Amino acid sequence: MGAGQNGGMGISRREFLKGSAGLAASSLIAARAVAAAATTSRIVRGPYGVLLPVADLATGLPLLLLPEGFSYRTFSWAGDRMAGGQRVPRNHDGMGVVHAERQGGETVVTLIRNHECALSEPILAPARYDAAIPPGQRFPPGSGTTTLRFSGRKWLGAEASLGGTFYNCAGGATPWGSWLSCEETFTDLTATGGRRHGYVFEVRRDAAATSGKPIVDMGRMMHEAVAVDPVTKFAYLTEDNPRCSGLYRFLPNDRNGVAGSYENGGLLQAARVAGRANADLMAPSVGDTHRLEWVDIDDPDANPGRMPTKFPGRPGLASGPFQTAWSKGALLMSRGEGICHHQGRFFVVDTEGGAGPDGVRGTGEGVVWEYDPRQETLRAIFVAGTAQVADNIDNITVSPRGGILLCEDGDRPADQGGPGTRLLGLTTEGHSFAFAQNLVALTAEMIQNVDKQVAPGDYRSREFCGACFDPAGTTLFANLQIPGITFAIWGPWERGNF
């Protein structure tokens, strides 16, 4: 999922947050209050109240369960028309706010959204990395990004901003107002006239300025998400390769913090637990804390390969960077997913962290780690022992007021509102609560009545992703990956920690 984050803004944070001073901006850090004896987290009643069906302001369809007082509008469904006439690609995924500014009394918000596709209809963007069509196929790599604009509660439109990439899953917004789009693959199409894949690409707010140049020094791997330290300009990256996943950071050569600076290269490193070579962190308990150090990745563009038979993860292909990292004692996670930054700390999701029902490590329901780069500590603040607590959490974001929000990518947990994936919040004690639930089940008649191009079906099991708040904390944006819908949600946020 992907990861949704807030990036560089054209309006001051002070103006956006006027009237909300003193609210709990550090509630994410307060998860340290979890009882020391607990090994896993619980699900609790949320501060926003019971979830009820709410009709979409755009289509009139009841697509979400939300607390009383909340409303939403959908926009940019897969198949809708974009600027220039091409249709919105499918498989909405990671997304972030990259800019916001006042225009005519309203705040215009610019978002950039990933589309996690394989070989499919191309995204005809100004920048296209790989346009080759492999032999025997109809289409080139069909992933990339679209750029969206929203004014107040009014949808303005979308345009293509990056094409010719593969499986663009998550990514992250930069402090300088661009989007880092991550390929979750190490597919190599050079033998069929294409290019190597598995890179990070920077997408500018102005789509025409996007270069389409892979940032090779950020590694070639099954990338998931990235978050940038606004002070050091270091980027922290997750890897979503089942039981072959590390935690990485990129130290750019150019630390001016401007669009294109990462394209000037840098040093990739992997995290290692101090004093514990090859530490297995796939099944932690709440409160587990480790001190980190970092090892250099000599060749970030190395090919994937097989791990040794004694490797504790699942046998299979590991990325070149992970193989080097492991040889130097780096740590092991199950499947790194979302990562985000807030007030000097990073929050990292391991979507299968924990143990499964059969006791196998790294097949659980998800873990949230808090990383403090100044203390170099990594601490487990949330561990879902069952699918009811959280069902394979994925993307993560933090509201301007400090509330952590998680996207589920699981198998329809049975809740009081019926089956459906959820947007989950974390309490200050490190427990989860349901903030929203997926009700999307569409008949052919419903689709025709609202003039959409998606296929009919029950989509309640499909993942939420791309959650991100506008910088004022008044609007939560989120995606349902399939059938491909983007939501803007409003309401009385002050009732809880969002």
Image (spheres, helix red, strand yellow):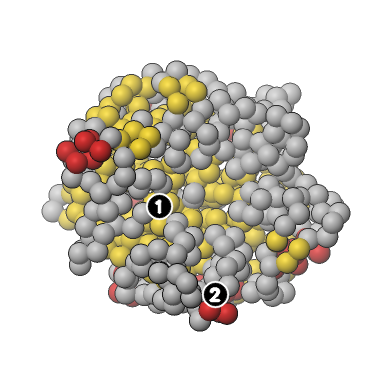
Residue 229 at what x, y percent from top left?
53, 58
Residue 54 at what x, y percent from top left?
28, 27
Q: Which residue is mark 2?
A: 189
Q: Is residue 147 above or below residue 20?
A: below
- Which one is in front, 470 or 434? 434
Q: Residues within 10 Å of mark 1 (few under 14, many from 20)?
A: many
- The quarter in which the C terminus is drawn is top left
483 relative to 396 in the view: left or right: left
Q: Is residue 20 above or below residue 485?
A: above
Residue 346 at what x, y percent from top left?
57, 49
Which residue occupies 59% across, 60% down? 222
Most extreme residue toward the front is 136
Q: Is residue 410 above or below residue 303?
A: above
- Which one is in front, 139 or 184? 139
Q: Amino acid at mark 2?
A: Leu
Which residue occupies 57% across, 49% down? 337
Q: Amino acid at mark 1?
A: Asn
Cα–Cα gap, marks 2 and 1:
22 Å
- Which one is in front, 488 or 146? 146
Residue 296 at what x, y percent from top left?
72, 69
Label 2, secondary structure: give it: loop
405 relative to 235 in the view: left or right: left
Q: Which residue is mark 1?
A: 91
> Mark 2–mark 1 contact, CB under 8 Å?
no
Q: Residues within 10 Å of mark 2 (few under 14, many from 20)?
A: some
Choose top left, top right, bottom left or bottom right for residue 285: top right
Which residue occupies 30% across, 35% down? 442
First of labels 2, 1 by sequence position? 1
Q: Is residue 200 visible?
A: yes
